[in-house]
Image: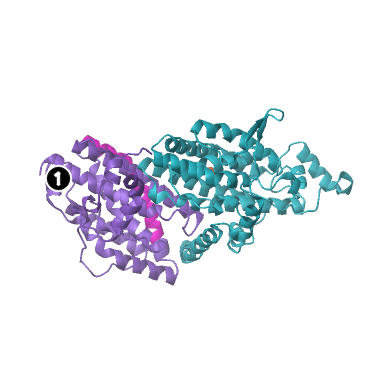
């Protein structure tokens, strides 16, 4: 999930009686599965929560370029390099759609970027983990994009129109990402011994962090209910995590790899796997900024932004000159 | 030098230009000044990789020793690379990267234009595919050069510095040798020197719009086309070839 622990901008769910007439009508539209559009009235808390969620999602796409960008110049064949570049380029495109969706709520892209660079807005915890061998390009596509899809497919039905439409476009590309990731894993898992070792090493490092992408267990998640009532969160963290585990375990077996969670067992009663929780202390550490790459990831974005200032200023100044010349003619 | 030997050399020159430049451009992905540029730079890098696969693929075919485009890209050392020194220059700031791109795009668009009528249909076919992409690259890099050259004082100064720094690496494009002679006689490719005038005209026009001054120097660093490179190429290859070299024979 690219938006984790998004704090809902209200305390608890308002009951029908606590709502104003406008709020009741608004909730009625959502309950009837109508889309809310930018010009429609919406509660301030709905708007604020969405800005946080879409902004965090957009930031994740942008920062998410970095771990994979790390291997672009070392991609092993021309074809792999082209596929990887196209994938990272898609992520930048996802960032664009999402910033545009956020802009319809009255916040500019630059404002959101400033919040990110100042450390006041977050991005997904997963991108604070390093990519250490080529197989990580497979594991990221397969597991990280795979986990993102779990969350984004239902979000295509989210109540806010522009967000929902952005998700439709994003999902189309994400499934390609997951497939190409799995294709790399297949190559690695069926390759020479060193490649198999890389594949196993990737899985070992990305398994638990991928589970963390869905956010803390429902019992510890305080922000969900109102967001679910508003349909900006569709499933609970645990539901999605379970779905992800159930989908991924057979794939791990198919690859002939070993899941780092040795407790995995099929539970007939619930029709899903029982699995071990990731280390939630590690998760909170990463969220706080202590993950292996937090500092580098943010520093890379800050540097790109600061180094690029003269370019943005220069192009803007030129556009103004040009407009003035046209006006003078 | 036989015709096929000359053609092999020439195709390496084309394919090595694109593989090295795409590598350089791809270094920017995720680090550029604005999101739209991340996307555009990725696009350029992708186009150049596509062209590399065509040029080096054909080079392997012409050579006739069973080498693929990947073999040629990943398993030759620097002295066997035939790219212009210009494309291996380090990225520098965004302005320098775009200046390098512009100087190259202008040359490449003219070269491909001539190759459209190559007597070798395989060459003409690749040129037809690539020239559409390169026309777009040129349009974009020229716009950026003008925008930043005629932007703020700071951006102007940076673009002038970029031009000053790269100018001495442009002359190599127009140095002809035996390869050119053999291929131009056969009608396969133009003589390198024959592109000079048009290039100067094109580049001069854009640089004038950009309010930039062409350096007063006619010195040309050279060697790339015959395999004598700058110190930078070795590091590019070290990155690029790492996996192929570390795990010989593995399939990716
Ligand atoms: Fe994405
Ligand atoms: Fe993706």
The reply to whether the magenta stretch includes residue A165 is: no
Chain A color in figure: cyan
Relative to residue A278, is residue A12 drawn left or right? right
Q: Secondary structure at mark 1?
A: helix
* Quadrant placement of the N terminus of chain A: top right
Main secondary-structure element of the magenta-colored stretch: helix
Relative to residue A233, is residue A138 drawn left or right? left
Of A146 and B87, nearer the camera is A146
Q: Position of residue A90 (x, y in %)?
A: 50, 45
Q: Residue furthest right?
A: A17
Work out whether residue B133 can be spotted.
no
The reply to whether the magenta stretch includes residue B134 is: yes
Residue at image location 77% in from the left, 47% down from the top: A226
Q: Residue furthest front?
A: A262
Residue at image location 47% in from the left, 38% down from the top: A185
Mark 1 surroundings: few (<14), some (14-19) or many (≥20) residues within 10 A: some
Q: According to the image, label 1 marks what residue?
A: B184
> Where, by quadrant of the figure, is residue B90 drawn?
bottom left
Of B78 and A58, nearer the camera is B78
Give me the chain that's purple. B
> Where, by quadrant of the figure, is residue A292 drawn?
bottom right
Relative to residue B77, is residue A38 drawn left or right? right
Q: Position of residue A301 (x, y in %)?
A: 52, 60
Relative to residue B16, is residue A88 drawn left or right? right
Q: Position of residue A134 (x, y in %)?
A: 43, 46
Q: Which span of residues is magenta-colored? A: B120-145
Question: Which chain is mark 1 on?
Answer: B
B31 versus A138 height, above or below? below
Q: Position of residue B100 (x, y in %)?
A: 33, 59
């Amino acid at each position: 999930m690219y938006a984790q622990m998004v704090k809902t901008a209200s305390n608890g769910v308002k009951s029908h009686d606590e709502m104003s007439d406008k709020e009741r009508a608004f909730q009625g539209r959502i309950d009837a599965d109508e889309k809310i559009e930018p010009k429609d009235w919406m509660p301030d808390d709905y708007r604020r929560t969405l800005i946080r969620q879409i902004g965090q999602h957009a930031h994740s796409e942008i920062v998410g370029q970095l771990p994979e960008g790390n291997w672009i110049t070392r991609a092993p064949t021309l074809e792999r390099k082209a596929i990887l570049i196209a994938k990272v380029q898609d992520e930048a495109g996802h960032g664009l759609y999402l910033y545009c969706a956020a802009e319809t709520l009255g916040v500019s892209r630059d404002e959101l970027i400033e919040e990110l660079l100042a450390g006041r807005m977050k991005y997904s915890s997963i991108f604070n983990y390093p990519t250490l061998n080529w197989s990580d390009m497979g594991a990221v596509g397969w597991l990280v994009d795979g986990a993102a899809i779990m969350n984004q497919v239902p979000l295509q039905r989210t109540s806010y129109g522009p967000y929902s439409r952005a998700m439709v476009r994003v999902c189309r590309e994400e499934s390609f990402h997951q497939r190409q990731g799995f294709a790399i894993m297949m190559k690695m898992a069926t390759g020479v011994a060193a490649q198999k070792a890389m594949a196993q090493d990737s899985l070992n490092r990305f398994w638990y962090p991928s589970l963390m992408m869905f956010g803390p267990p429902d019992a510890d998640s305080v922000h969900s209910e109102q967001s679910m009532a508003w349909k900006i969160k569709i499933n609970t963290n645990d539901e999605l995590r379970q779905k992800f585990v159930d989908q991924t375990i057979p794939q791990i077996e198919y690859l002939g790899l070993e899941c780092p969670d040795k407790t995995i067992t099929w539970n007939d009663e619930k029709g899903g796997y029982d699995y071990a929780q990731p280390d939630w202390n590690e998760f909170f550490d990463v969220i706080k900024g202590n993950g292996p790459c937090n500092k580098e990831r943010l520093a890379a974005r800050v540097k790109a932004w600061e180094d690029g200032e003269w370019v943005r200023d220069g192009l803007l100044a030129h556009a103004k000159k040009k407009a003035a010349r046209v006006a003078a003619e | 030098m036989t015709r096929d030997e000359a053609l092999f050399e020439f195709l390496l020159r084309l394919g090595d230009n694109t593989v090295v430049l795409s590598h350089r451009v791809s270094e920017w992905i995720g680090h550029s000044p604005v999101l739209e540029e991340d996307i555009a730079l990725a696009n350029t890098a992708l186009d150049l990789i596509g062209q590399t696969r065509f040029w080096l693929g054909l080079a392997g075919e012409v050579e006739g020793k069973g080498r693929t485009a990947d073999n040629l890209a990943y398993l030759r050392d620097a002295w066997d690379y035939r790219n212009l020194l210009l494309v291996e220059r380090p990225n520098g700031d965004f302005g320098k990267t775009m200046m390098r791109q512009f100087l190259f795009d202008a040359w490449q668009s003219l070269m491909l234009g001539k190759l459209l009528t190559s007597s070798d249909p395989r060459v003409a076919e690749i040129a037809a595919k690539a020239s559409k992409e390169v026309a777009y690259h040129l349009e974009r890099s020229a716009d950026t050069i003008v925008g930043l050259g005629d932007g703020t004082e700071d951006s102007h100064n940076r673009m002038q510095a970029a031009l000053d720094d790269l100018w001495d690496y442009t002359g190599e494009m127009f140095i002809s040798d035996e390869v050119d002679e053999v291929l131009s006689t056969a009608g396969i490719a133009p003589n390198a020197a024959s592109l000079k005038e048009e290039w100067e005209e094109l580049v001069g026009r854009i640089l004038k719009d950009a309010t930039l001054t062409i350096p007063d120097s006619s010195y040309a660093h050279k060697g790339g086309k015959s395999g004598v490179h700058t110190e930078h190429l070795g590091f590019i290859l070290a990155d690029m070839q790492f996996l192929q070299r570390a795990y010989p024979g593995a399939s990716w």
